[in-house]
Image (spheres, rainbow, N blue to C red):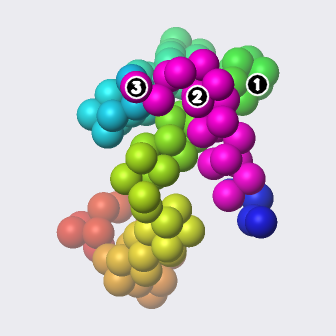
């Protein structure tokens, strides 16, 4: 079993044991990801990146990942497959010869 599958099984079991699956529809999981990402962003608000509380950052990042894995499971998506597809698509939009060392958006390269 891959590490990713182990994580998916663990988070799904956690939810199942608490009978939370009933709340885990695609819309609410997507909203939860956004809310947790906002909580992650809030850790950086009004301070430099070096001043972030790393323990809180790990907790909020874990929440984002957990809800993302729950959403992928709900929709029966292969996380590895969709991430690799997105990397391939981004590689086409951001060719190395144009994008290397640049923070410009693909349509500005």
Residue located 44% across and 68% down the image: 82
Residue located 43% across and 61% down the image: 77
Does the rendering let one see residue 49? Answer: no
- Residue at mark 3: 22
Mark linked to residue 54: 1
Residue 23 % position (x, y): 39, 23
The span shown in magenta is: 5-22
Give the Cα separation between the discs numbered 1 and 2. Answer: 26 Å
- Residue at mark 2: 15
Comparing 59 with 97, the one in front is: 59
Q: Secondary structure at mark 3?
A: helix
Q: Secondary structure at mark 1?
A: helix
Residue 20 % position (x, y): 50, 22
Nearer-N-terminus badge (1/2): 2
Residue 34 % position (x, y): 38, 29
Determine crowd level at label 2: few under 14, some 14-19, many 20+ residues with C-alpha closer than 10 A: some
Give the Cα separation between the discs numbered 3 and 2. Answer: 9 Å
* Residue 72 counted in the magenta span: no
Nearer-N-terminus badge (3/1): 3
Q: Secondary structure at mark 2?
A: helix
Residue located 72% across and 29% down the image: 58
Give the Cα separation between the discs numbered 3 and 1. Answer: 32 Å
Quadrant of the rendering where the C terminus is positioned: bottom left
Name the dominant secondary structure of the magenta segment. helix
* Residue 13 counted in the magenta span: yes
């Amino acid at each position: 079993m891959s590490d990713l599958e182990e994580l998916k099984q663990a988070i799904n079991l956690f939810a199942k044991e608490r009978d939370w699956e009933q709340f885990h529809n695609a819309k609410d999981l997507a909203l939860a990801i956004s809310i947790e990402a906002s909580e992650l962003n809030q850790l950086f608000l009004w301070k430099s990146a070096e001043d972030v509380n790393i323990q809180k950052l790990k907790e909020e990042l874990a929440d984002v990942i957990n809800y993302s894995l729950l959403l992928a499971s709900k929709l029966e998506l292969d996380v590895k497959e969709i991430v690799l597809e997105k990397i391939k698509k981004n590689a086409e939009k951001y060719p190395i010869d144009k994008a290397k060392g640049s923070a410009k958006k693909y349509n500005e390269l």
